[in-house]
Image (cartoon, rainbow, N blue to C red):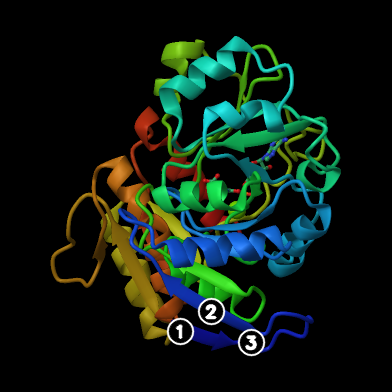
Amino acid sequence: MVAYHARDRSSAAPSVTRVRRITAELPDRDVVEEAAALLREGQVVAIPTETVYGLAADATNAAAVLRIFEAKGRPSWNPLIVHIASVDDLHTVARDVPDLARELARHFWPGPLTLVLHRSPQIPDIVTGGRDTVGIRVPDHPVAQAIIRAAGVPLAAPSANPFMAVSPTTAEHVVGGLAGAIPLVVDAGPTRVGIESTVVDLTTAPPQLLRPGGVPREALEALLGPLAAPTLASDGESRASPGMLDRHYAPRARVTLFDRREEAVAASLAARARGERTAVVTWSGPIPGTDAIVMPDDPAAFAARLYQMLHALDEAGVDRAWVERPPATPGWEAVINRLDRAVAH
Ligand code: TXA
Ligand code: MG
């Protein structure tokens, strides 16, 4: 067990963050019980899921959920996803569940798909930002499932990063952002999917794709037919999924997407000559004679390493990064969405 102390946080409670390692395949009961006990007491705990690490609290306890917002510095109008251990628990968090939701659950749960449904009275306003709907998913991770079951309550959990920062795919990322603000991080190693769940609103007809993510659009459209884009309010903010159009997932480095590698290399060299730290990131293979970072050319494999790469830029003190624009094909939709947000400074 490792303990980290707060660096410069002025907020009260807890000032020491413990990190407990756990094996994903065979979750250690002691660690699961420690996390569950804190959650039952109304504390927050960072837990692994297959997408990113989540900052969990008892979704039925408004005071506990408030601690999530405090730790993240997140505005409370941005609703949270509620995590349950199995589709059998859906009725405890949602009401008027349409057959379509059960069909999607059969195909994609456990997995990186969040369904927005009408909320049950058990779910307090603070979870949903006062909406009548709630986002729900069953994470495909044995540790997350074991902790939900041991806690005996649904868990509200956003990504375990400070508001607007890059989501964490390792316990080290969580500690880097939230040390001193939370009592416990359950460390099961790097997450498998690497980007957040796909969010689909089933309370509208046709259903709306609120956020592309771990489940590709084509897989959903094969069952649902064409998905609608989210409706935008006049200020450009998404009415259905507030927070989606914010600058999110951004590293400290200024990120530019490039199409032509020669131009990226030239711009990077020019910036280096001015004393800036730079990086060039490709997916189409190494750039001879440069130290370009080479990412996978498959979208799922790229996604699995995306946040790790953005965190690494920050750790290396990179000022400017040029990232090769992925192909505009459907499989890359979620990666392009996250890269666009990393660019928007
Ligand atoms: O993979 C994930 O989804 C991760 C892991 C921890 O499960 N969680 C995550 O949570 O990404 P968060 O809070 O960072 O993102 C939740 C997204 C936001 O875009 C939010 O606006 C949307 O889901 N959302 C949640 N509840 C909603 C609701 N009732 N209506 C519309 N959008 C909702
Ligand atoms: Mg997030």
- Asked if the residues shown at circle 3 and circle 1 are in contact, with their CB atoms under 8 angstroms apart, the answer is no
Q: Secondary structure at mark 2?
A: strand
Cβ of mark 1 under 8 A from ligand 1: no
Name the residue located 36 percent from the left edge and 32 percent from the top edge.
331
90 is higher (above) or lower (below) than 341: above
**Is 170 on the left or on the right of 93, as rendered?**
left
- Among the two numbered marks 1 and 2 on one chain, the one whose residue lies closer to the N terminus: 1
**Contact, mark 1 vs mark 2 (Cβ under 8 Å):** yes
Q: Position of residue 130 (x, y in %)?
A: 86, 40
**Quadrant housing residue 190:** bottom left
Please give the label number shown on residue 2.
1
In the rendered view, would you say 101 is above or below 245?
above
For this rendering, which residue is in front, 70 or 154? 154
Q: Quadrant of residue 26?
A: bottom left
Structural distance between the alpha carbons of marks 3 and 2: 11 Å
For mark 3, what is the residue?
A: 6
Classify mark 3: residues with Cα within 10 Å, few (<14), some (14-19) or many (20+).
some
Q: Name, please, the residue furthest toward the left.
A: 288
**Residue at the spot 66% in from the left edge and 46% down from the top edge:** 153
Quadrant of the rendered image holding ligand 1? top right
Residue topped by disc 2: 18
